[in-house]
Image: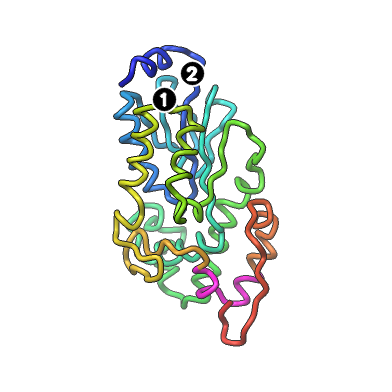
Amino acid sequence: MSNRWRARAGEKDQPKIFVATHHKAMTTYFKAVLKLLAFGLDARFEELSKLAPQPDTRVFLSAHSRTPWSEVGPYRGIHIMRDPRDIIVSSYHYHLWTNELWAHIPDENGQTYQEKLQAVDKTEGLFMTIRHFIFFSREILETWDLDDPNILEVSYDDLMGDQRDAVYSEMFNFLGLQGQEHELGVRLMRLFEAGKRSKVSATKTNEGAHIRSSRSGQWKDELEPEHVAYIEQELGQVLEKFGYARTPVTGSTGAV
């Protein structure tokens, strides 16, 4: 760890650095990056859901972007956003087989979320997933502060694009890392790129894998007009807020 970081780490007003993600929006990826980044900086790392980081934490992952920011103190962070329609499609396929504990907790009727999802066809399963997304994510996205000067908005599409190296550099510059620390962050981003972690193709899907597909816009092939209309009704403001165009439903085969 550099002398510069040691000096900064001893300052009480030194900003904590973080990445805030959403379910199926590169959470696993950034957990790997930030854990090793913190190790390289000789700093404490935490993965959080709803709690604020501990006072001695320097680097943290806000796994669902629900961190109580007013309790964090000075911070500098990155918010990762993905088209909610792609999140919904990715979540549907992932929830069918995931081993995550929440999906296997029986409800009052003794049935788990995964069992209920597996018991219905894809059309109803996608509706279930849309409702799940609305319940857990709509409020946080509707109230998210896009004008916070200490949070850089970064899109999933840009992180998957041909110019992603420039995005990596911009991110770590924004977090205040320079020299070897900045280089470490960029190298870790390259190391854990989705395609390198699981041989994910930009055009092919990998069923049963945590990263099924890295392709943007896959919702156009999977959602039916009724799904799109429901999303428009319930999440239209969220789509517009984060710059995702409302695409007209076309065709007569149940695809968009």
- Rendered location of residue 200, percent (x, y): 34, 62
Q: Nearer the viewer, residue 133 or 26?
A: 26
Q: Nearer the viewer, residue 136 or 243?
A: 243
Q: On the image, which quarter does residue 34 sit in?
A: top left
Q: Would you call the spot at circle 2 few (<14 residues within 10 Å), some (14-19), or many (20 or more)? A: some
> Are circles 2 and 1 on residues that touch, CB within 8 Å?
yes
Q: Which residue is mark 1?
A: 58
Q: Is residue 110 visible?
A: no
- Rendered location of residue 130, percent (x, y): 56, 63
- The type of residue carrying mark 1 is Arg
Residue range corresponding to the magenta coloring? 218-229
> Residue 14, labelled with which disc?
2
Residue located 33% across and 68% down the image: 206
Residue located 56% across and 58% down the image: 84
Residue 196 is inside the magenta segment:
no
Is 212 located above or below residue 27 in the figure? below
Is 243 located above or below residue 12 in the figure? below
